[in-house]
Amino acid sequence: MNRIGNKIFQIRLRLSTGWIIFFFLLVTTLSSQFAAEYPHWGRTGHWIIGFSASLLFLGSILLHELSHVGMARVLGLPSPKLSFLSFRVTSQLTVDVRKPVNELLIAGAGPASSLGLAVLFGAGWVLMRTQSETIGVLAEWLAQMNLMLALFNLVPGFPLDGGRILRAILWMFTGSLSKATRMTAVTGKGAAGFFFAGTIGLVLLEQFVFALWIGLVGWFLWVSSKQVAQLGRIRDSLEGLTAGDLMVRDCPRVSPRLPLKSFNEHILSNLDRDSVLVLEGDLLQGIVTPYELGRLPQERWENSFVEDVMIPVAKLRWVGPEHSILRILENMDREEIHHVPVVRQGNLLGVLGRNEIYARLRTQVQEAPN
């Protein structure tokens, strides 16, 4: 699914194009609803209020998400990329909140902002309902939707805020993040079962549209809870691993002035690793991978060299062999880097790439019980 990316206050946003479609569907639905309930507004009025309500509602969701990032910054924690309005389930495998109170504050910031908006729009409805019907209706709808958004996010299941709040509380009492994660995954499955029961009830009442939505929410919580439980087990298995445990020690080495065509034919085609060190004598110049090579059109390989596509050493992030794999993976995700040299006292020991970490992850997924 394609995404549109931008930055607000140096926070990277990723807007799913699927939700752009949802926005226009919401505008159409609300315009039709207002046309049925308030025919005297006129066709143009219906579309203006429908568009305004949809835009302000999505803005409310954005503020909800930004409040999480804002709280993380207040607490001095790294701010991750914000996938705004993405349909996919985002794992929190590499998010380091350091202590339970941080997770409680970060998770609670979202529902708090939505409740605040519900109160704000509710006050607007009280003040404007006798002054302007259209603004009053708009404020009332936004107050209701923000209240629903806050309550929905308080459902105690991952990846909703309620699941993270519950995990933070359990973490405080048990002293174990892993145990709290497993316990919260169980409550998430229980919440999913509640939604499934509601789906059956709505079907019996012949409320098929609502039944479909409630069923989808239940399925979403069920799948997410299973993923979180599995990721918790994987995190446990990675907890004690360091860069020295997974780094590649025998990386091939090439000259920065090796032609790309020769590099592809004689080095890359016989390579069982995904990274190659670029050295000038004994001095590291950078790293090159199939990904960097693929970014250059093949017709330009004839007259280009490894140094033209390599990741220069100035852009690499160094780690020590004792550094935690989980912390390294967190930094890789945040900074969008794929490889880090592993260095001890100025000596290059090897290279750690995402592939080495993900290979261990795949092994853990296969070995972990469902």
Image (cartoon, rainbow, N blue to C red):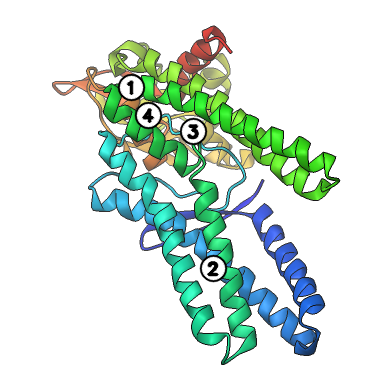
Given residues 318 and 151, the one toward you in this image is 151
Mark 2 touches mark 1? (CB < 8 Å): no
Determine which of the numbered discs, if any, sits on residue 325 in the image. Answer: 1
Q: Residue at x 23, y 48 (%)?
A: 75
Q: Quadrant for the C terminus, please.
A: top right
Asked whether residue 72 appears in the rendered view, the answer is: yes
Q: Earlier in the sequence, mark 3 or mark 1?
A: 3
Residue topped by disc 3: 91
Mark 1 touches mark 4? (CB < 8 Å): yes
Q: CA distance from mark 3 to mark 2?
A: 30 Å
Above or below — where is 107 with respect to 172?
below
Query: Residue 326 at x, y = what percent?
Result: 34, 25
Quadrant position of residue 253 = top left
Q: Residue at x 48, y 45 (%)?
A: 154
Residue topped by disc 4: 329
- The local crowd at label 2, few if under 14, some if 14 to 19, many if 20 or more residues have their Cα within 10 Å, is many
| Amino acid type shown at disc 1 | Ile
Residue topped by disc 2: 143
Asked whether residue 256 appears in the rendered view, the answer is: no
Of badges 4 and 2, nearer the viewer stands: 2
